[in-house]
Amino acid sequence: MSNNSSYFNDSLARNTQGVFSHSGGDTGGESMTFKVLKLSLYALIFLISTVGNSLVCIVIARRRRMRTVTNYFILNLAIADLAITLICIPFDIPVQENGYKWPYGAFMCKIMYPLQTMCMFASIFTLVAVSLNRFWAIVYPLRQEMSKSQATIIIILIWFISSGLTVPYVTVLELKNGDDCSESWPEPGYRKAYTACIFVVQYLLPLTLIAFAYLKIGFELRKCVGTRTANSALERAKQEDTRKVVRMLIIVTLLFAMCVLPNNVMWLWLDFGNGNDYEHIWEMVAVTNIILFANSATNPVAYTICNERFREEFRLYFTCDPKIFHTMQTTIFKSFREESEDCSQAPKLFKNSEEVLLVTAKETVV
């Protein structure tokens, strides 16, 4: 076993985002091409994630029609993604480039990695919440829908639970020898148990629940198509919007699953296999980091590609055309006033020069 591997085995500090810290590590074996590519990808991910998730937050916060229950969860997901980006990349790159020596002191050692882990828990729990919300709304349409206040309470609980799950991690992190931020477990088996627990709670169980929810939703939507025909343009538009929203959420979930899996496999390999002996472990660490951080940048792109309303809002935000805003506001008010006699199905009409989009006043979809 190389010296780097022995240091890695003795003083490895976990970040379930995928960043490692140890004493005596060395990234000098990286080729210049690999290093330039790595840093370029980090910069690209940081830029896309920061701009994209900030824009998602601004659009949902400032535009009344975007404040739906589903979008509350998307807002929370964007906040978690933004936090991951701002906490991970600017602080982790100096650690990696400094031979994995910790430069930030004892207090930051205690909170930096757990904050990253907490945000990852919040991301997956938010995806679970939004999938179950869609499940209840579509599979059991006669039941009362979740309110915005209930969604807010769930979001608070998500962060509370995520914080609680990182408490063991906070307690075992210690700064040793001035530059080694690593874990000190009472027994080696505790470390393995925590790794397995994170894999189950942060990946396996949530994705199983999400898969169940979306499978049931898919069956229900297919059944609706096969057993009845929409009797109005409004109903057809609502059904199509529901399918688009579900499709977007499934894509976001699949992106999460694909980006987080390599990191989980890495930790299982290190704690339960012989990953410490692998010659190119540091290159693999860097690659899994990049894949993991990329998830925070892919979500805003998915919203833009898959959701017409987000595209329209982003376009309006960048064009800032007063005529467009005036036309939309006038049309929305006029349409709502004309259709308000049927409160349960009152449509709002969002119109530009090229297209008409019908959604219900209840706004059960994004």
Image: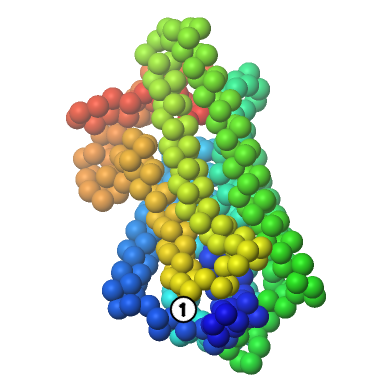
Compared with 241, 67 (above or below) is below
Which residue is depicted at the point 52% across and 71% down?
Answer: 278
Whole-percent x and y of residue 13? 62, 75
Whole-percent x and y of residue 300? 39, 49
Q: Quadrant of the N terminus?
A: bottom right
Which residue is depicted at the point 47% across and 32% down?
Answer: 246
Neighbourhood count class around disc 1 (C-alpha, 10 Å): few under 14, some 14–19, many 20 upward:
many
Q: Nearer the viewer, residue 199 or 110?
A: 199
Look at the numbered disc 1 and give the secondary structure of its residue. Answer: helix
Residue holding disc 1? 96
Which residue is depicted at the point 72% across and 75% down?
Answer: 172
Whole-percent x and y of residue 80? 52, 57
Q: Based on the displayed image, in which of its 4 quarters is residue 109 positioned?
A: bottom right
Residue at far front of view: 1
Q: Based on the displayed image, in which of its 4 quarters is residue 148 positioned?
A: top right
Q: Nearer the viewer, residue 24 or 217?
A: 24
Compared with 50, 155 (above or below) is above
Amino acid at pointer 1: Gln
Q: Nearer the viewer, residue 322 or 127?
A: 127
